[in-house]
């Protein structure tokens, strides 16, 4: 911008954005007041509106986090996050996308890892809520498969499904807050607690898995066939009822709507999808 | 002339049809809309709320679209930004519009950020020839991409720029003349901006080409004595109802919604307030206010 020349549109927008994000007042030279108040009061509407709106967006996506931290600390933490991570998304829904990672390292929250994990759980639930649709696999879809072919049966997880391993009791904290109860005291888990988040019809779900189920889910989600899953279960625990245990987990995943497709994957043939529901 | 002309550019010659009286679609009202039969003739859906992969938002919009006409109304197109469009935005919006067949697609005459940042606000434009040229070029790009008409809404502003070369309404009139875009006329925003800038809301109404307005917005605001803040969280005030009356006299029957973005009341309360718009339009326009 040359001296005394009006700014170009690009220069003006750069100045205006800087005024909002960095509290720089250079833009005020370009703005008259009105007959009742000064230009800085009018510009302040944008500045205040930005902070209030963005904090409101994050609070809306993370009610459990806000309840756990309390209003004042939540707003302080969110404001600090936004200062380091201005939104780059056209959808307000994604504004807090980097929040769990930020909380894991931020000075205010890093010493309490359940805070970042609480945010991570809420993000996973939010992501599951509007994840891609897919017809889910029904038990009836497997009825026609001859028993000898089950060994080659592989499965596809629903797009909403996400596995988490939590080193804290953030899931129990979230559950209590969700029920509007007092949260339990923070606790650490070693080994971590395995969780599965997914969407059942229109509702985001989360549940704790046993370590064996978590291991088998992870392998199944990678396309490992039923037969191999049974071999893994036999190594992991009692080999006598390994197939029964895997079948039980599988039934739970199917009834929960966490799988979309079953595919026969014989070693000598290309994968052949079976009908999903 | 068909909706798409031979050179595959969108035609804006066919005016979107009059839809009557509707509401801004809000998730809080999904079940009351779908489980009941409220006297609402159409809905305006926030485009970005449905620019997601799947799940409840799209399922609900599908069910509502089966029963009602809709308009897709965006908040992040950033038509006046000097930063290129977000590469994914327009293709995603086109895909949404192709799926749900809105009567038209709309957004705001504003910018929301530059350098890849989105401030999630509807920021003011300087009314200069440079800005006009820039905005018109971007509108053409949007209409070419969407292959359907675009309507732009006047926003509430709190500041104006000393180097503006024309009033807002002149900028808007020239914009629609050059691009053929349609206009969403937010009556509340006209009232708010006129108060904040010591200008005349009636001058604004009289400066807008009468044949380009395809939608009215009605909303509430917060009066801060020295200026007005557009909160969209309150009932429509008497002054805005009076301005709506003046707008009806100038623009005739125009699809109307009441828009609430915060402190959203039960659907029944919104329907009651919408009835006031319907009665006022009938008073000004007579039978022409009804959807035929």
Image (cartoon, rainbow, N blue to C red):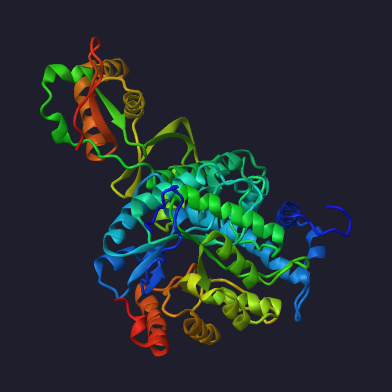
Res A71 visible: no
Instruction: Report the side of B39 relative to A240 (left or right).
Output: right
| Percent x, y of residue B32 | 30, 68
x, y percentage for residue A219?
A: 34, 23
Q: Position of residue B231 (x, y in %)?
A: 56, 71
Q: Quadrant of the C terminus of chain A?
A: top left
Q: Is residue A150 above or below residue B83?
A: above
Q: Looking at the image, is A119 positioned above or below residue B18?
A: above
With A133 as the anchor, is B94 left or right in this view? Answer: right
Image quarter of residue B26? bottom left
| Name of the residue lying farthest toward the right | A3
- Observer-nearest residue: B103 or B224? B103
Q: In the rendered image of this protein, does residue B240 appear above or below residue B159?
A: below
| Residue at x-position 59% and y-position 43% | A103
Residue A130 is left or right of residue A67, and the answer is left
Residue with the most extreme bottom position: B283
Q: From the top left corner, tell me how far across and down residue A107 is, in percent.
A: 67, 43
Q: Residue at x 33, y 49 (%)?
A: A203
């Amino acid at each position: 911008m040359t001296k005394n020349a009006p700014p170009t549109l690009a220069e003006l927008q750069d100045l205006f954005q800087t005024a909002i994000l960095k509290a720089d007042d250079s833009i005020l030279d370009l703005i008259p007041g009105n007959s009742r108040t000064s230009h800085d009061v009018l510009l302040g509407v944008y500045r205040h509106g930005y902070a209030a709106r963005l904090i409101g967006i994050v609070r809306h996506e993370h009610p459990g986090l806000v309840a756990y931290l309390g209003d004042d600390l939540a707003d302080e933490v969110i404001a600090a996050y936004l200062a380091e991570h201005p939104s780059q998304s056209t959808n307000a829904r994604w504004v807090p996308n980097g929040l769990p990672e930020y909380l894991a390292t931020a000075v205010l929250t890093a010493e309490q890892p359940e805070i970042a994990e609480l945010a991570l759980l809420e993000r996973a639930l939010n992501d599951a809520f509007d994840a891609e649709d897919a017809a889910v696999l029904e038990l009836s879809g497997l009825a026609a498969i001859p028993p000898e072919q089950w060994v080659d049966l592989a499965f596809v997880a629903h797009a909403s499904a996400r596995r988490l391993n939590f080193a804290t009791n953030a899931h129990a904290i979230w559950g209590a807050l969700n029920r509007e109860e007092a949260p339990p005291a923070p606790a650490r888990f070693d080994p971590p607690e395995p969780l599965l988040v997914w969407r059942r019809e229109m509702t985001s779900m989360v549940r704790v898995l046993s370590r064996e189920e978590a291991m088998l889910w992870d392998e199944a989600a990678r396309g490992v066939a039923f037969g191999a899953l049974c071999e893994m279960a036999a190594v992991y625990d009692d080999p006598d009822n390994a197939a029964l245990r895997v079948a039980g987990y599988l039934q739970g995943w199917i009834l929960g709507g966490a799988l979309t497709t079953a595919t026969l994957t014989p070693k000598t043939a290309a994968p052949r999808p079976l009908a999903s529901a | 002339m068909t909706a798409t002309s031979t050179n595959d550019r969108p035609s804006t010659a066919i005016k979107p049809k009059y839809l009557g009286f509707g509401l801004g679609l809000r998730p809080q009202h999904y079940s009351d809309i779908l489980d009941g039969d409220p006297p609402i003739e159409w809905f305006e859906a926030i485009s970005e709320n449905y620019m997601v992969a799947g799940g409840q938002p799209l399922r609900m919009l599908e069910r509502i679209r089966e029963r009602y006409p809709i308009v897709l109304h965006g908040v992040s197109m950033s038509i006046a930004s000097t930063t290129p469009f977000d590469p994914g935005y327009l293709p995603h919006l086109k895909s949404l519009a192709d799926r749900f067949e809105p009567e038209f697609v709309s957004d705001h005459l504003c910018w929301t950020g530059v350098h890849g940042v989105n401030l999630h606000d509807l920021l003011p434009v300087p009314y200069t020839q440079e800005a006009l040229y820039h905005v018109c070029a971007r509108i053409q790009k949007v209409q070419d991409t969407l292959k359907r008409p675009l309507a732009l809404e006047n926003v509430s502003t709190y500041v104006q720029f000393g180097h503006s070369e024309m009033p807002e309404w002149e900028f808007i009139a020239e914009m629609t003349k050059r691009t053929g875009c349609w206009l969403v006329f937010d009556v509340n925003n006209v009232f708010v901006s006129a108060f904040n800038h010591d200008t005349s809301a009636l001058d604004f109404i009289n400066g807008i080409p009468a044949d380009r307005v395809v939608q009215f917005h009605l909303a509430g605001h917060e009066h801060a004595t020295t200026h007005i803040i557009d909160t969209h969280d309150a009932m429509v005030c008497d002054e805005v109802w009076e301005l709506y009356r003046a707008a009806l006299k100038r623009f005739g029957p125009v699809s109307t919604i009441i828009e609430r973005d915060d402190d959203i009341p039960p659907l029944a309360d919104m329907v009651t307030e919408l009835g006031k718009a319907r009665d006022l339009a009938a008073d000004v326009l007579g039978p022409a206010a009804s959807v035929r």
